[in-house]
Amino acid sequence: MNAAENVLEFYPIWVDLAGAILGGILGAYAAARLGTDVTGALIVAVVTGLGGGMIRDVLLQQGPPVALASPWLLAAAAGAGLLTFLFSGHLHRLPGRRRIAPFYVVVDAFFLAAWTVVGVAKGYAAGLPIVSCVFLGVLTAVGGGIARDVLLGRRPLILQPGTLEAGAALIGAAAQAAATLLIGSLWGALVGLVVVAAVRILSLALRWQTRPARIVSADEPGDSRGAA
């Protein structure tokens, strides 16, 4: 067993299970808000909860994706999606939603970090170069959300200006990859976990946001391309 596989050995299955449930809830709720039927909501729920990991495992070509090999992950994402669809009309009326918001931010940051760490570790375990490991970490973290937005016919959220999500995963994956080379895989995974979660939480709490590209048109001052 190589060093990176040690990280995967200590990675608890309940993290994947809880992540599938969380993704299923978010995916089904997004689908319900756009008026899909129950079948559409279930498809989006499963894709959101499991899409990032499945894409990663297909790219690694190391047997069936974890989501298909496990008897629980598909059921968890679909079950969470079904319940969310059935009660979607009442969710916005739940009491205490504002009190739940800080808890959700922490949970969201934790799972973003956990998926990033596992993606990087799986890349190392497969013997991939460091850049590919970072890519797999980010893909695992945000792949499900990208697939959700594509299915719902909207521009993926990570391609729009806003708080750091893919950015947090990228910074944390790079930190984990560098730390793994310097201090070992287990400590590197811990560094990645902390960095991703911290950047994500701080970006939401302090409203760190990316800005859209500013395209200078031909008639704006300082642009000589429109000059005669």
Image (cartoon, helix red, strand yellow):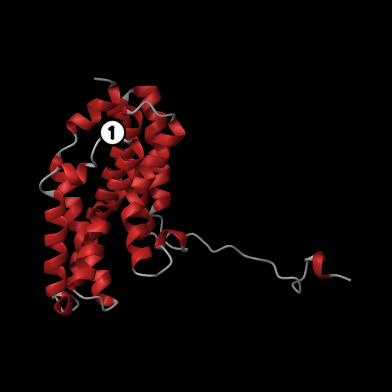
> Which residue is rendered at x = 20% and y = 60% of the image?
24
Q: Is residue 123 above or below residue 56?
A: above
Q: Quadrant of residue 88?
A: bottom left
Q: Quadrant of residue 94?
A: bottom left
**Which residue lies at the image location 15% right of the left edge and 69% below the top edge?**
84
Q: Where is residue 189 in the image (x, y as percent from the top left)?
A: 30, 33
SS at mark 1? Answer: loop
Q: Residue at position x 37%, y 34% from top? A: 176
Quadrant in the picture for the N terminus: top left
Image location (x, y in percent) of residue 196: 34, 45
Q: How crowded is mark 1: few (under 14 residues within 10 Å), some or many (20 or more)?
A: few
Q: Where is residue 171 in the image (x, y as percent from the top left)?
A: 42, 43
Relative height, residue 136 to residue 184 (above, below): below
Q: Does any portion of residue 57 appear in the rendered image?
A: yes
Q: Name the residue under label 1.
A: 62
- Near-viewer residue (165 or 32): 32
- Amino acid carrying mark 1 in the image: Gln
Image quadrant of residue 118? top left
